[in-house]
């Protein structure tokens, strides 16, 4: 089945700087890669997703890039703000039968003022 | 804005006791998921329903865990007997039918087994 590895496990950046979180996946058939943000004590929420037919997607300060050949995808947050502090999870879909998401281990991002 | 509801939010139970969690998905969402999230890790899928049918329960410890969604709407996840290692956050999520769609998560139930 699919295996998703996420790095780093913790990331601390200065407010205004950029943050990058990277994930690798094992199943070359995976074609859907969402990113979820989980603030302390709150539910995970989708912030951006990308499908395998595109290499990059942007939404204001957030972007995701996908390299299908290398089987990795990354989340880029520019001009970071204190409210970006949270745990971020990447995921990849596992095909075959019922499609399901396999999540990475999470990255705790801290934005320092 | 519609949200996934879960109850209880917190549950403390002794090992060997039975415990149950309830989830009410967003209205009209045919797909419902139960995840277990151990502290410091990502959510792990336990069971996935399409309407009232289980479509994936490969990671559900069936000797002690059971799940049902009798009318294809709300769902219950049960653990009997609970073990110390079951302490975790149990998240429910739902999504519309078809394709690769966003999963909407509930607030979760934090279970502590003593």
Image (cartoon, coloured by chain):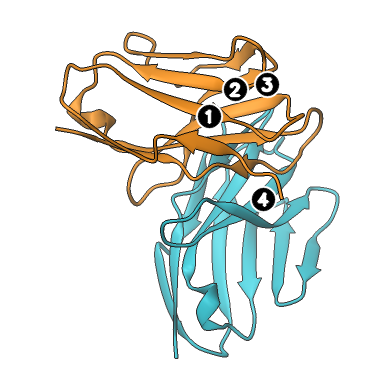
Chain colours: A cyan, B orange
How crowded is the residue under tag 3: few (<14 C-alpha within 10 Å), some, or many (20+)? few
Q: Position of residue A32 (x, y in %)?
A: 73, 44
Residue B74: mark in rendering:
2
Q: Give the crowd class for mark 2: few <14, some 14-19, many >=20 residues within 10 Å.
A: many
Residue depicted at x 77% and y 69% = A59
Q: Are marks 2 and 3 in contact (CB under 8 Å)?
A: no
Mark 1 and mark 3: Cα distance apart in space: 20 Å
Residue A97, horizontal then vertical, whole percent: 69, 17
Name the residue at 81% across, 28% down: B98
Give the spatial CA distance, label 2 vs label 3: 20 Å
Query: Which residue does the numbered mark 3 point to in the structure image?
Result: A98
Q: What element does badge 1 sit on?
A: strand
**Is residue B60 visible to us here?**
no
Which mark is in front, 2 or 3? 2
* Labelled pair 1, 4 in contact (Cβ < 8 Å): no
**What separation in Å lies between label 1 and label 4 (alpha carbons)?**
23 Å
Residue B40 lies left or right of residue A8; in this view the side is left
* Label annotation for residue A34: 4
For the question of whether residue B29 can be seen, the reply is yes
> Could you say where residue A67 lies in the image, as x and y percent from the top left?
71, 57
The disc, 1 or 2, on the residue closer to the chain's N-terminal end is 1
Neighbor class of circle 4 (other Cα within 10 Å; few <14, some 14-19, many 20+) is: many
Alpha carbon of mark 4 to alpha carbon of mark 3: how far? 17 Å
Residue designated by label 1: B23
Mark 1, Cα crowd under 10 Å, few <14 / some 14-19 / many 20+, is many
What is the residue that sits farthest to the right in this orientation?
A53
Total marks in image: 4
Q: Chain of mark 1?
A: B
Quadrant including the C terminus of chain B: top left
The chain identifier of the residue carrying mark 4 reads: A
For residue A11, above or below residue A66: below
Helix, strand or loop at label 4? It is strand
């Amino acid at each position: 089945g699919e295996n998703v590895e996420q790095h780093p496990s913790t990331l601390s950046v200065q407010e205004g700087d950029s943050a990058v979180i990277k994930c690798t996946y094992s199943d070359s058939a995976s074609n859907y890669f969402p990113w979820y943000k989980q603030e302390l004590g709150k539910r995970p929420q989708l912030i951006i997703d990308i499908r395998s037919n595109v290499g990059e997607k942007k939404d204001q300060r957030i972007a995701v890039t996908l390299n299908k050949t290398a089987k990795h995808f990354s989340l880029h947050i520019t001009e970071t703000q204190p409210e970006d502090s949270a745990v971020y999870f990447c995921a990849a879909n596992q095909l075959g039968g019922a499609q399901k998401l396999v999540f990475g281990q999470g990255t705790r991002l801290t934005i320092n003022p | 804005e519609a949200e996934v509801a879960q109850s209880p939010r917190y549950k403390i139970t002794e090992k060997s006791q039975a415990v149950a969690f309830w989830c009410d998905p967003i209205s009209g969402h045919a797909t419902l998921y139960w995840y277990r999230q151990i502290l410091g890790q990502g959510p792990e899928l336990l069971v996935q329903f399409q309407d009232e049918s289980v479509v994936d329960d490969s990671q559900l410890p069936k000797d002690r865990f059971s799940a049902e969604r009798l009318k294809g709407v709300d769902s219950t996840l049960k653990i009997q007997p609970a073990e110390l290692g079951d302490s975790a956050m149990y998240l429910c999520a739902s999504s519309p039918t078809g394709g690769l769609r966003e999963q909407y998560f509930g607030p979760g139930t934090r279970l502590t087994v003593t």
